[in-house]
Image (tube, rainbow, N blue to C red):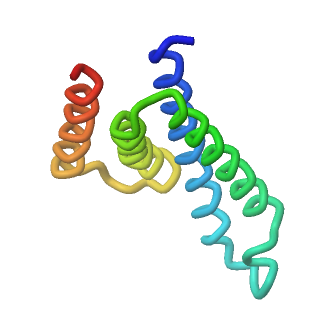
Amino acid sequence: MSEEFYIGLNLFSVFLASCTQVVLKKSAMNDRLTGLAYFVNPATMAAYSVFLGCCLLTFYCLSHLPMITVNMLECSAYVYILLFDRIFFGKPITMRKVGGNAMIIAGIIVCLNR
């Protein structure tokens, strides 16, 4: 398979891992969960299971892509988190955050075009 396929697969893995962060944060904000239920509940366990799958997928991509490429693609999580924070938690998107994410995207593009 082509390098582009593994780049796409790694980006999908990063996106999915970012989605699990939303689930974990929502679960942590649930005031009704106390004690062991705070850590062992269906949402948290599902999120950690998916996150484990994402880690394994990233390891698989590492066997087909240079490490620097995979590391750069992992930085795209910051872009997803920025969007998810706005969509799910109502946090504002500031110009500083936009500038930081623009630099991340530019770095990824530069790395992929070397």
Compare residues 84 and 12 and report the one nearer the observer: 12
From the top left corner, tell me how far across and down residue 101 is, in percent.
25, 42
Q: In which quarter of the image is the C terminus?
A: top left
Left or right: 107 as drawn, with respect to 16: left
In the image, residue 104 lies at what x, y percent?
A: 25, 40
The percent coordinates of residue 57 (x first, y second) are 62, 38
The foreground one among 64 and 46 is 64
Outermost bottom residue: 35
Could you say where residue 81 lies in the image, as x and y percent from the top left? 43, 48
Residue at 68% over, 52% down: 52
Please determine whether, in this image, residue 96 is positioned above or below residue 35: above
The quarter holding residue 105 reads top left
Q: Measuring 46% from the left and 25% from the top, which residue is drawn there?
A: 7
Q: How many labels does the image show?
A: 0
Quarter of the image holding residue 102?
Answer: top left
Vertical placement of residue 12 versus 91, above or below: above
Point 73% across, 63% down: residue = 44
